[in-house]
Amino acid sequence: MIFKHLLLENFRVFYGKQPIDLALRKEGVYQRPIVLFGGLNGAGKTSILTAIRLVLLGKRAVGDILSKKDYQDFLAEQINKTALTEDSNTCAKITLGFTYTHHGEHKKYEITRSWHSLTDEQLTLKVNGEQDTSLNTEQVQSFLHEVVPPGIGDLFFFDGEKIAELAEDDTGRYLKEAVQRLLGIDVLNRLSNDLKIYLNENGSKTADKDTLNKIKAAEADKQLAKTLSEQFREKAEKLSTHLVELDKEIARKELIIQENDGAWATDKDAAHAKLNELLAKKQDLQAELKSEVNGNYPLALAPTAMQALLSQLQADQKIKQAKAFSNELTSHLDGLRQRLQTTLDKQGEAAYNEMQRYFGQIINDTALQTPKLDITDADFALLEAQIADAGIAKANVDKLNKKLTDVQAELDQLSVRIERAPDADTLRELYQSLRQLEKERDTVSREYIGLMLKAKAYKQTELDCAKRLEKLYAGLKNNHSADKATLRVEQSQSALAEFKEELIKLRVTQLEQLFIDAYRKLARKEDLKFSAKIDVKTFDVNLVDSAGVTINRKSLSAGEKQIFAFAILEALGKLSGRVLPVVVDTPLGRLDSIHRGKLVRNYFPEASEQVILLSTDTEVDEDFYQALAPKISHAFEIEFNQQTRSSTVKEGYFWQDKIQEAV
């Protein structure tokens, strides 16, 4: 796939029509892969990346969880404000031309996505210059998702914020999701679920009315719990985004405070160091607290109910054991009677009758009792262990909350001292602002944890309903176990599970090697001790040193984290098997000169057959431009006009003319 041209019309900062030629140009017989865009902050670099993502991915360019109304609101926000002022029914439009080999045929495609502020979007497709009228908007989007799957698109079209997010993602959540999408595990899981649904529906055909009613009730409870869990999780995700923004603003304030450090008297250095120490300690405690509440901690919030549940389950276990004893005893009574008659003659019958009366009372007592909660021994042991762990987790949470309260008290005292420092009005204002942001972050963090706990509780309810359904369907399944269709489905499930396991092992091994190759290209010589190890069960991605010891990613510098992120993105992109253009916005912001040089010389020229870079003048400066020049097809400069509040794109790059004259 190669982009040929891009046309923006009333899109974000681009007023009217703005055509951009993306077709690669040759130098002799060699084709240069890089198209370079230069622009100051706010000029419109991100608008170009957003346009490419939006025209190809549609709603999925904005996020996986997005309502139709939110998407329409997003589209309305992308319409150029000047154009809207002139005409409230202004149409925004993005057109992208590209070549692509589809079903063995190399063709020219042109897609156009257009929308008004109050109407649904329209998506049209041209193939070799001819409009394809047989496809509606949804069908064209399906074709585009086949060309650029949403999960794959994130590996090729990304910005500096995505790199920073990936680099700072200590949980590994983003990588887990990317690896699973890339390996197609989600598709295999859906297929497995579909097969299970088929078996369940097949078994339901002969179910009695009472069983069907139980199934319907369990399905309804499960769906309700799933809906509520997803709603709370969605709200939590929005708060998570807000937390990230607050962290960035706090980091910015802290940087400003550090830059103003010279205004402090020398005896304030100790207080400044103590503040940083307390902030780091607070962050670590919050991370530990978050980890604890994400485990079995919610079970400790209802100790009386949990104890009652355990007591009932223990009573049920005794009943089941007594029933098992009764059944076993009954099966041996005839043999016992014969043995007694043979051994004791006439007295044997009397002895047998006495024993029968004794054990008969036990059997009758047992027969009158029924377990209220029929769960397996394994489930009982698991629940018992979880409740025990919950008690430990609660004790840990209480300790962590106490430590957090103490640290916050010290922070408040220290902040008051700092605010009262003489001749430091600016610093006092900064610290007041910082404290306000931290309080807001604490409030949002507590709300986030609360929502996650609710989501987890409903998720547990959903799982409990699923277990009930599993037992109900298991009873129905026995009636159809001999059906040919059922046998084939079960064989398919077994083969699918085996295929999934082998696929994961193979692709994870490939990804680890691709990462090592990419990292060696980008890292400094002293950093080459790092490699990656991916857990085939959890998809956790860990850095390990030459001795095989896992490295704490928090200990890496910002530059090292970004190099790690670029390396993993390149490895994931290559593993996908897709040949797509790479589009990167502001890629070098947090890197030192050595790491920047590595990316400029070893990553961008080889990242893909076509690489579109969107950079500021301080990222790709004169030196880096000269280093990239042999690989640059052509360059553009994005200029923002303060009077019209809009941008235009012209060919050239800041000091490009001066460099060419020198050459």
Image: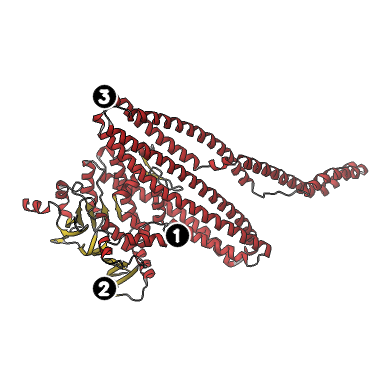
Residue 425: give x, y in percent of width and height.
28, 32
Q: In this view of the protein, which residue sits in the foreground, 527 or 228? A: 228
Q: Is residue 1 visible to us here? A: no
| Closer mark to the observer between disc 1 and disc 3 | 3
Label 1 secondary element:
helix
Q: Give the colour scheme of this rendering.
A: secondary structure
Residue 86: give x, y in percent of width and height.
25, 65
* Label 1 crowd (10 A; few <14 / some 14-19 / many >=20): few
Sequence-wise, which precedes: disc 3 or disc 2? 2
1 and 2 marks in contact (CB < 8 Å): no
Residue type, mark 1 in image? Val
Label 2 secondary element:
loop
Disc 1: which residue: 187
Q: In this view of the protein, which residue sits in the foreground, 17 or 424? A: 424
Disc 2: which residue: 128
| Closer mark to the observer between disc 3 and disc 2 | 3
Residue 151: give x, y in percent of width and height.
37, 57
* 38 to the left or right of 254: left
- Disc 3/disc 2 C-alpha distance (Å): 72 Å
Residue type, mark 3 in image? Thr
Q: Residue at x 41, y 50 (%)?
A: 238
Sequence-wise, which precedes: disc 1 or disc 3? 1
